[in-house]
Amino acid sequence: MEASDVRSSEHLNITDPKALASHPIPPCDDKFNTKFPCYDFVWSGNQSRRVSDIVSAIMANNPGRPIPTNKVKSFKGPEEVDVWFTSHPLHAPGALHFTERNATVISYGVQTNSSSATKRGRTEDPTFKFLVPLQIAAEREIARFLIGDPKFGWSFGFKEFPQPVVAKDVTISPLNLMGPVFFLAFSMFGFVLQLGSLATEKELKLRQV
């Protein structure tokens, strides 16, 4: 029986990875082990009107799927987001934190759970599935907002780093599971017999000068 996760990149020899150009923010329903009701993302900085406009643009311009308002939740600051994440685990895959520093600088941060999740032999990569789409969306709409062009082109392509096979073949067989136990028991059986013979010889005072 061969494990399903041999299809993950750790088990592949990647010499020329393909660029992933379109990174829409996925629906939270697609996340492994999610809890409902869920949100596609949450964000902080809602005291700023400019930040609110940027988030609205992120939702409206998500490639292939505008994000509905009931799938986004806002907070005043990162501390409130941390409290909400603690009390609502697995209800959102990530958060965007915006700070309006001055008229020409709006900074942001991305907060996601970097732990990989596995479901039915498939592994979910939180970096490419959630972090990268949130990062691209935030940078794109901040740039469009600051230059005053809502149609400004913003396209990125990301590639997985080339690598050899870094994980051993995952093969599960009865021999792999029970073999070590069987050989240990077999060797211990002979060892016990030898100890028994030695004790008998000692009691009968055999092989003694």
Image (cartoon, rainbow, N blue to C red):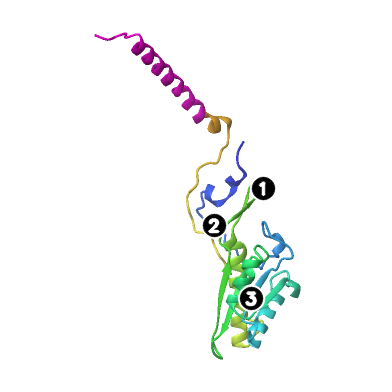
Q: Secondary structure at mark 1?
A: loop
Pointer 3 residue = 43
Q: What amino acid is found at the position of numbered circle 3 in the picture? A: Trp
Q: Closer to us: mark 1 or mark 3? A: 3
Q: Closer to us: mark 2 or mark 3? A: 3
Looking at the image, is 205 positioned above or below residue 80? above
Pointer 2 residue = 17
Q: What residue do we see at 36% from left, 15% from top? A: 198
For marks 2 and 3 on the same chain, the one whose residue lies earlier in the sequence: 2
User: 37 or 149: which is nearer to us?
Assistant: 37
Q: How far apart are the alpha carbons under marks 1 and 3?
A: 31 Å
Pointer 1 residue = 120
Residue 115, picture quadrant: bottom right
Q: How far apart are the alpha carbons under marks 1 and 2?
A: 25 Å
The span picked out in magenta is 180-209
Q: Quadrant of the N terminus?
A: top right
Does residue 23 show up? no
Residue 57 is situated, as x and y percent measured from the top left of the image, at 68, 80
Q: What amino acid is found at the position of numbered circle 2 in the picture? A: Pro
Looking at the image, is 199 positioned above or below residue 131? above
